[in-house]
C-alpha cells in the first residue's frame, strides 16, 4: 500500500491525540511513502510573535511575555506546549520525499517560514508556489500539479492515487 500524507497549516506540523501531523508522523513511521506540507509554519511561537507584531505593533518582548503568560493556560486547556511546535528541530529526521506548498499571498504563515522548512528538509523535496491565500481552497490546477508530482515520486499510476478533499 502506498501512503502519502497531505497536511495543511497546523495539520502539516502539529500533533494531536488521534494522529500526528504530516511532519511528526513521517519522522516516526517507515510506512509513509511521501508527504505534502501545505502552508506549514516553522515555529508556533515565532508565528505568534510575527502575527502579534503585525497586528498590534507591540514590541517583540511584550508579545513574548504574553506568550509566556498564556503558555500554561494553553497547556492546560489544549493539552500541548506551544514551544513543542518548533518543527525546525525535526526536519533532519524525516526520510520520505516531501512537497512543500506556499503562497506569497498567505497572510497567516509567511512564505519565509515555508522556505525555512524547505531548506532544512534533507530528503527529496519539491516546492510549489501557489496563488491562493492561507484559508482559500486550493485550485484544481494547484492540486493537479501536486498529484502529478506525487505520482512521479512514488511511481504510481493514475488508478493508484486516490484524492479525498474535505
Image (cartoon, helix red, strand yellow):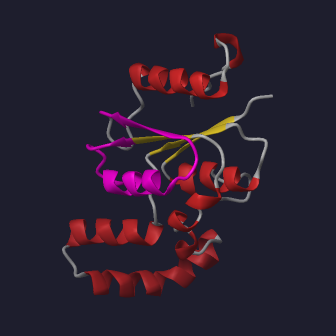
Residue at 65% across / 59% down in the picture?
93
Q: Which quadrant of the rendered structure holds the C terminus? A: top right
Q: Which quadrant of the rendered structure holds the N terminus? A: top right
Residue at 64% across / 37% down in the picture?
34
State the image coordinates of residue 102 (x, y, percent, origin top left): 38, 43
On screen, residue 36 above or below 94: above
Residue at 73% across / 41% down in the picture?
32
State the image coordinates of residue 3 (x, y, percent, origin top left): 72, 34
Which quadrant holds residue 90?
bottom right
State which region is magenta: 102-131
Q: Would residue 150 be seen by someone viewing this image from the given angle? A: yes
Q: Would residue 110 be seen by someone viewing this image from the given angle? A: no
Residue at 65% across / 44% down in the picture?
96
Residue 68 counted in the magenta span? no
- Which residue occupies the foreground of this view, 154 or 20? 154
How many callouts does the rendering have? 0
Left or right relative to 128: residue 163: right
- Which residue occupies the foreground of this view, 73 or 5? 5
Which quadrant holds residue 104?
top left
On screen, residue 157 above or below 16: above
State the image coordinates of residue 120 (x, y, percent, origin top left): 48, 57
State the image coordinates of residue 143 (x, y, percent, origin top left): 47, 25
Left or right relative to 2: residue 138: left
Amino acid at each position: 500500500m502506498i501512503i502519502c500524507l497531505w497536511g495543511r497549516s497546523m495539520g502539516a506540523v502539529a500533533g494531536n491525540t488521534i494522529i500526528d501531523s504530516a511532519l511528526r508522523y513521517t519522522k516516526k513511521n517507515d510506512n509513509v511513502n511521501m508527504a505534502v506540507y501545505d502552508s506549514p509554519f516553522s515555529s508556533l511561537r515565532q508565528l505568534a510573535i510575527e502575527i502579534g507584531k503585525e497586528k498590534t505593533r507591540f514590541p517583540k518582548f511584550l508579545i513574548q511575555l504574553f506568550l509566556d503568560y498564556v503558555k500554561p493556560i494553553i497547556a492546560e486547556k489544549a493539552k500541548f506546549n506551544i514551544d513543542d511546535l518548533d518543527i525546525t528541530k525535526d526536519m533532519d529526521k524525516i526520510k520520505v520525499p516531501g512537497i512543500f506548498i506556499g503562497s506569497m499571498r498567505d497572510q497567516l504563515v509567511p512564505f519565509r517560514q515555508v522556505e525555512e522548512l524547505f531548506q532544512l528538509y534533507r530528503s527529496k523535496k519539491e516546492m510549489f508556489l501557489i496563488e491562493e491565500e492561507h484559508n482559500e481552497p486550493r485550485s484544481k490546477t494547484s492540486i493537479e500539479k501536486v498529484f502529478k508530482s506525487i505520482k512521479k515520486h512514488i511511481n504510481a499510476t493514475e488508478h493508484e492515487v486516490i484524492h479525498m478533499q474535505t
